């Protein structure tokens, strides 16, 4: 028998039925398995490069290392210089997703944040989709409280600073649209460890107080103060804003507490009557302590006082520095409008400027009595053209000490106006 015949004969050898039934599925599946394996290898080796870059973990994004922070801290210059696009500036280190999660809860001073966490996890009983007697198995992940059940609130200390500031050019025009790479920041002489948030806030809720000088020295100008304040509140107050009005001479008179009702604020302003001495520092100290400091907010707000006065104090028991410190403790920006319309500035005008500069506000000096309203309009525009920066300071100690803030734009044409510092929190009692 020739070789080809022997091969044909061998190929025609019959296998038992049980072997054929067992081997047939394997023979049929073998080519398919081979093709799938080859296709998978081809897919992995031919994966386009842009796809790899697209799925790079966000944790690989540029963030300042500890060495960079230490190097920045020892740099003699207090403010970072402009950096190339690939290198972040000290005040604009790109945060990781974990650093972007916390939301600000107060104004500038670090404060406690309310974190809602269920105290105990209560197993659910019967839901509308369950049959009677069936219970929901315990969750394996993090416990989440149902919306219809109360939760306990745990307050924890969060070392975050909320800084609100304004940028203008040399003509006083507001500069908007800047990014965090355009600024350099030092907190108590050191760069922050992380920048958590940087936004241009035009709709941040306002907590505004109108302080009208009702002493005898401004009797002839008081009606202009009232009319301008009412017009300001009509223009500035939005849905989530609140304001209060008060008059002060030797004592303070809160004519209307915090409200969003402009009619009530109008009535409060009209009730004020001038007369008596001027205890400006006492009034500012007490207003920040009693009205601004106790505010408990769940989100970031802008706290501002508009102080309308000639700046002449002849009755206060506290010093000017004490009043400024209380404003800083309450994270309150103070804008001042002078009612002195004489051609030259006097000592009272210098007092108003010192208060506004220390708290991140601005002093306005109308040249005519009717221009008091222009000061209010300038304040209104500024409050809607501010930036909001949230960062974590380096070396923060819970000792209640004062920490300075030095914020500057990298572009020398721009001027930054911000609070000069804040008081660190004390340990919880």
Image: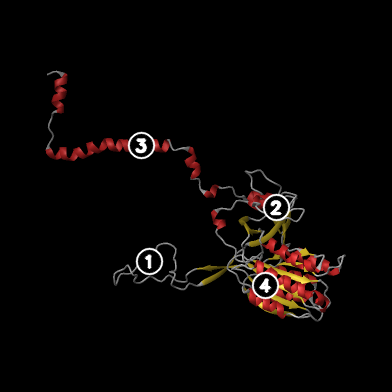
Q: Nearer the viewer, mark 1 or mark 3?
A: 3
The residue wearing badge 3 is: 39
- Characterize the local packing of mark 3: few (<14), some (14-19) or many (20 or more) Cα atoms within 10 angstroms: few
Identify the residue under disc 4.
292
Query: Rounded to the nearest whole Å, what is the CA distance between mark 3 and mark 2?
Result: 54 Å
3D distance between C-alphas at marks 3 and 4:
68 Å
Question: Does the image show residue 367?
Answer: yes
Q: Is residue 358 left or right of 56 when viewed as pictured? A: right
Q: Along the line of sight, which residue is nearer the eye, 67 or 413? A: 413
* Structural distance between the alpha carbons of marks 4 and 2: 34 Å
The residue that mark 2 highlights is: 73
Q: Residue at x 64, y 49 (%)?
A: 67
Could one spot residue 425 in this view of the protein?
A: no
Q: Earlier along the polypeptide chain: callout 2 or callout 1? A: 2
Q: Which residue is mark 1?
A: 138
**Residue at disc 4, secondary structure:** helix
User: Where 236 falls versus 172 (above or below)?
Assistant: below
Q: Quadrant of residue 185?
A: bottom right
With respect to residue 173, does 272 lie above or below?
below
Query: How far apart, in angstroms, are the residues tagged by discs 1 and 3?
Result: 42 Å
**Disc 4 to disc 1, C-alpha distance:** 45 Å
Q: Residue drawn at (19%, 38%), measured in percent from left and top?
A: 24
Choose top left, top right, bottom left or bottom right for residue 195. bottom right
Residue 148 picture location, percent across and down: 43, 72
The nearer-to-camera label among 4 and 2 is 4
**Distance of label 2 from label 1 (alpha carbons):** 50 Å
Q: Which x, y percent locates residue 134?
A: 30, 69
């Amino acid at each position: 028998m020739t070789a080809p015949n022997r091969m044909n004969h061998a190929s025609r050898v019959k296998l038992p039925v049980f072997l054929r039934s067992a081997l047939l599925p394997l023979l049929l599946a073998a080519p398919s398995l081979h093709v799938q394996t080859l296709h998978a290898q081809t897919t992995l080796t031919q994966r386009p490069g842009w796809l790899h870059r697209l799925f790079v973990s966000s944790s690989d994004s540029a963030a300042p290392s500890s060495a960079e922070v230490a190097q920045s801290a020892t740099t003699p210059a207090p403010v970072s210089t402009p950096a190339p696009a690939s290198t972040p500036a000290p005040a604009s280190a790109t945060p990781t997703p974990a650093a972007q999660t916390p939301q600000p809860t107060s104004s500038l001073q670090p404060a406690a944040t309310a974190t809602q966490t269920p105290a105990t996890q209560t197993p659910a009983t019967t839901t509308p989709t369950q049959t009677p007697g069936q219970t929901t198995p315990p969750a394996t992940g993090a416990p989440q409280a149902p919306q219809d059940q109360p939760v306990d609130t745990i307050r924890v200390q969060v070392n975050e600073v909320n800084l609100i500031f304004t940028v203008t050019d040399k003509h006083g025009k507001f500069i908007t649209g800047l990014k965090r790479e355009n600024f350099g920041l030092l907190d108590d002489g050191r760069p922050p460890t992380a920048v958590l948030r940087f936004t241009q806030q035009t709709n941040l809720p306002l907590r505004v107080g109108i302080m009208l000088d009702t002493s005898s020295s401004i009797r002839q100008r008081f009606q202009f103060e009232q009319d301008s304040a009412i017009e300001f509140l009509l223009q500035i107050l939005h849905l989530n804003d609140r304001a209060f009005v008060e008059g002060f001479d030797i004592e303070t008179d809160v004519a209307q507490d915090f409200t969003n009702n402009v009619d009530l604020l109008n009535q409060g302003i009209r009730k004020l009557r001038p007369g008596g001495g001027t205890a400006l520092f006492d009034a500012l100290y007490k207003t920040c302590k009693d009205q601004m400091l106790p505010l408990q907010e769940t989100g970031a707000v802008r706290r501002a006082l508009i102080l309308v006065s000639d700046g002449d104090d002849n009755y206060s028991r506290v010093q000017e520095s004490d009043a400024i410190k209380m404003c800083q403790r309450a994270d309150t920006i103070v804008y001042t409008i002078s009612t002195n319309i004489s051609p030259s500035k006097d000592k009272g005008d210098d007092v108003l400027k010192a208060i506004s500069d220390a708290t991140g506000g601005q002093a306005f000096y109308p040249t005519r009595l009717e221009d008091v309203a222009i000061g209010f309009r300038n304040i209104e525009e500024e409050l809607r053209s501010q930036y909001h920066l949230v960062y974590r300071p380096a070396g923060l100690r819970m000792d209640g000490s004062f920490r300075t803030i030095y914020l500057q734009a990298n572009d020398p044409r721009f001027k930054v106006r911000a609070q000069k510092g804040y008081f660190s929190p004390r340990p919880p009692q």
